[in-house]
Image (cartoon, helix red, strand yellow):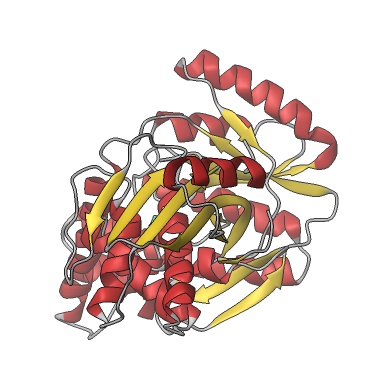
Amino acid sequence: MKADQQFLRDEFFKIYGDMATEPVLFYSPGRVNLIGEHTDYNGGYVFPCALDFGTTLLIRRAQRHEIRLNSINFPGEVVIPIVLNYLPVPKSWTNYPVGVINEFARKGIAVPGLELLFYGDIPNGAGLSSSASIEMVTAVAVNELTGAGLEMMEMVKMSQKAENGFAGMNCGIMDQFAVGFGKKDHAINLNCDTLEYRYAPLMLGNRRLIITNTNKRRGLTDSKYNERRSECERAVELISEHHPVRNLSQLTVSDLWMLDAYIADPVVRKRAKHVITENGRTLDAIKALEDNDIELLGKLMNESHDSLCTDYEVTGTELDTLVYEGRKLPGVVGTRMTGAGFGGCTVSIVENSRADEFIRKLGEIYTAGTGLTADFYLPGIGDGARKVESL
Ligand code: GLA
């Protein structure tokens, strides 16, 4: 459901009363990554874009010295006193906004009493960065209300820290970055080592993006994710005994021999191989889009999934069914998992004229193969986190 401003305003006043003071409105998108998966925390390249669905926040200063958090999506109010050091609450959605408020507090920025109402239309746990979206909408709102004047990049880093510390997910910077820096109709080519970035117009001609949600509950994603991260760190340690490297992205495909030579553990070797080859594919994909070679972009997306399936082992039956069955359908230029994996979504480039058929046929095949029902989204590419006058 798209956010309806009047409805949200009514809900806000129902909860908080005092209709004399209008709340201020902020909006932050979700994201989809086109290619460059599990490279961000290895100092590599990513190529995400912000979506045209996301999180809306209505916020105003409160009289009382406390922070009141409500969400249309998650029933029940959470009220916390203003302190200098906030603590996470197990399994609560409020860890995302409170983690960000904690980062402001840690910088010595006095956060006043606040009343907040969130509404998100990003499916939760689907790998489309609903959490980064909540973090970033909180960051831009608190930045504005406190007059802190922080730059977007600073808020991206603070939101990443909030996710690491409060949600226990040792994520890289891609999600918060894409959500913060998104630009309508553009993908963002980000070097996660230097944080240099460039926008590339996402012109797909007679083709479009389709996102497919496996609707598989992700469960162990965070612990598996953190495990992959440690495996990559292990690879860096082992290679560094012979050839000093800061991260895996300092190596290219011409260095792949080092993996055989220096890493005895076949699992760690495969993980490193994925990261190194994925960086190469991502750079090639960025060039392919710039050259308007969408067929090549699609081919690289397919190869990316193969590598995530075989070498990085973060896919699973549901994602693989969507991808490998989807590839057999007419008009599919490329298709791969997007985000952390283990469930969540795929992103596909499909010819416009075949989109309906893709959705119908793949939906049927997926249900027959897995017993689950997939959801399909036809996203537009939107702007990043910001204050808005209206929705
Ligand atoms: C999650 C993380 C990101 C990134 C992706 C995988 O979305 O939050 O930082 O590592 O997984 O590419």
Q: How many marks?
A: 0
Residue 313 shows in the view? yes
Tell me what residue is drawn at x 19 percent, y 63 percent.
86
Q: Which sits in the foreground, 133 or 94? A: 94
Q: Which sits in the foreground, 89 or 275? A: 89
Residue 168 shows in the view? no
Provide residue 183's location: percent of width, then percent of height.
Answer: 66, 68
The quadrant holding residue 353 is: top right
The quadrant holding residue 327 is: top right
Q: Which sits in the foreground, 296 or 64? A: 64
Above or below, 314 relative to 41: above
Provide residue 18's location: percent of width, then percent of height.
Answer: 48, 52
Above or below, 341 relative to 289: above
Q: Which sits in the foreground, 343 or 381? A: 381
Q: Ligand 1, what quadrant?
A: bottom left
Tell me what residue is drawn at x 60 percent, y 70 percent.
188
Tell me what residue is drawn at x 19 percent, y 80 percent.
240
Above or below, 314 relative to 105: above
Quadrant the N terminus occupies: top right
Provide residue 74's location: percent of width, then percent of height.
Answer: 39, 37
Provide residue 381's location: percent of width, then percent of height.
Answer: 68, 57
